[in-house]
Image (cartoon, helix red, strand yellow):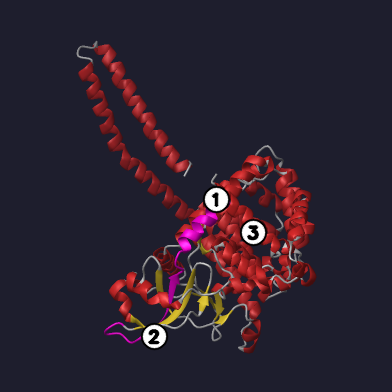
Amino acid sequence: MGLGSFFRLVNAGWVLAREGALSVLPVESLPPMMKAGIAMGRLVERPSVRRTGRIERLNAALHKLGPTYVKLGQTLATRPDIVGAQAAVDLSALQDRMPPFDSALVPGILEAAPGDKAKALSELSPPIAAASIAQVHKATLRVPGQPPHIVAVKILRPGVGERFRADTNSLYTGARMAQAWSKSSRRLRPVEVVQTLDHSMRLELDLRLEAAAISELSENITNDEGFVIPSVHWDQVAENVLTTSWVEGIPIRDHAALDAAGVDRKALAAKVLQSFLRHAIRDGFFHADMHPGNLFADPRTGDVIAVDFGIMGRINKNERKFLADILFGFITRDYRLVAQRHFDIGYVPPSQSVDDFTLAIRSIGEPLHGRTASDISMARVLGQLFAITELFQMQTRPELVLLQKSMVLVEGVARTLDPDLDIWTVAEPVVGDWLRREEGPIGRIEDLAGHVTRMSTALGRVPALITQAELTMAEHRAMMSRPPDRWMRGVILAVLGSVFVLIVTAIWRLLVLS
């Protein structure tokens, strides 16, 4: 544990408390120990925050602390139902209206990154959007033999990698301290959570990987409607530069402009939520940073336009089934299904009672059923979730952290567009269709095809295993020059038997445990 990281963490806590970050938390919903800690932290809060409830200075403080803290502020900005409407407005500037870096540095960055290919970019505009990691310029791409294209050029902030590493080192320090000093925090696996976020952010710092993510997502949504993303110009891509087609749209947070253009906000909210669920459940690959600064609406079609694919989430088939079953269980009020899936995936330890956990899930689900977003107090729901996770010793699944964070973002965006949103009604077509497909003939055939593929792979290994066994036997015969015939037959039978058992075991593990 480095002293530098420790003092950076202490400084971050001081700055956050001083500028009012603790004032936006739903204190009434938190456990007693957290309430006491927040009350103590607020003793150093600026008088202006206490007097007005405004946290304008917090944006600058988060930017100064580093990109990881800005990401936290961006998430909170999507939850006015938790932090309050005014705090959400104050924090929304973190999404794409942060101070840009010096534009004089841009030509040198382009020359050093895409190299000669950068000469095809001209008429570079001043920054049109700036966030914690990068800023975006509008430019014209001129390629010989092709008409000029208007493109978006995303450029990483100089030195952002060093700032990010300092952030994560301090977060690791805090996680290790929590794990060492608080037994109750160990079930939350804070170090593994930070490792997950660390990996995600490292990927975000290489814009070549973002270009690849756009390419993969584009292939996944080829036949979809209602969700549009830009295309990549690969020749103008480097580790710190990304060039994509230019997309025109109305910022999704500008409700007045959406209404003036005649965009149906209720339909838009449904498209945001359903598109995210489709990508997560159907494809297992989803945009994990869908805050309002990254979302626009096409005024002509009402489609969602998404940008900034630096943070993407990926979940496997079992995790997709878990998500679908959880949502479907809440939709159909099958709380036993919801509870059992939490045990199956390891959220709840097997020492707990499924029946008791079903009752706890029912206590959350019933008040939500049939309610619109405006009727639901998410602060109260979060408080209840805090209590349940502690009561049932629930374990954190680090590989699902990005999914959970993304669901909070997407649900927050959808409910601001449509305060009367019925989440379960909107989610049912996507979730229900996927589950019906998985349980139907097509899903069964795909599962069978997967088993056949794994069996073929296993059988393909058999000759190599037999060859290895023969070599082993030959070496053994060379060592034992004159063994009795009966003894040799026993050795051969034993070795062949072992090889057979190994082959059968390998095939069984591939078919059953995969």
Which is more foreground, mark 1 or mark 2?
Answer: 1
Q: Badge 2: few (under 14), some or many (20 or more) residues near its Cα, within 10 Å?
A: few
92 inside magenta stretch: no
Q: Which of pointers 1 and 3 indicates the residue nearer the eye?
A: 1
Q: Give the alpha-carbon distance from disc 1 to disc 3, as whole Å.
A: 44 Å
Position of 383 with respect to 394 (left or right) is right
Q: Report the amino acid beneath label 3.
A: Leu
Comparing 223 with 167, the one in front is: 167
In the picture of the structure, the residue carrying the numbered disc 3 is 327
Query: Which of the numbered marks, if any, corresponds to residue 4?
Result: 1
Q: Secondary structure at mark 2?
A: loop
Image quadrant of residue 485? top left
Instruction: Kindly indicate the quadrant of the structure image that contains residue 484.
Output: top left
Q: Which residue is mark 2?
A: 123
Q: Amino acid at mark 1?
A: Gly
> Magenta segment range?
143-172
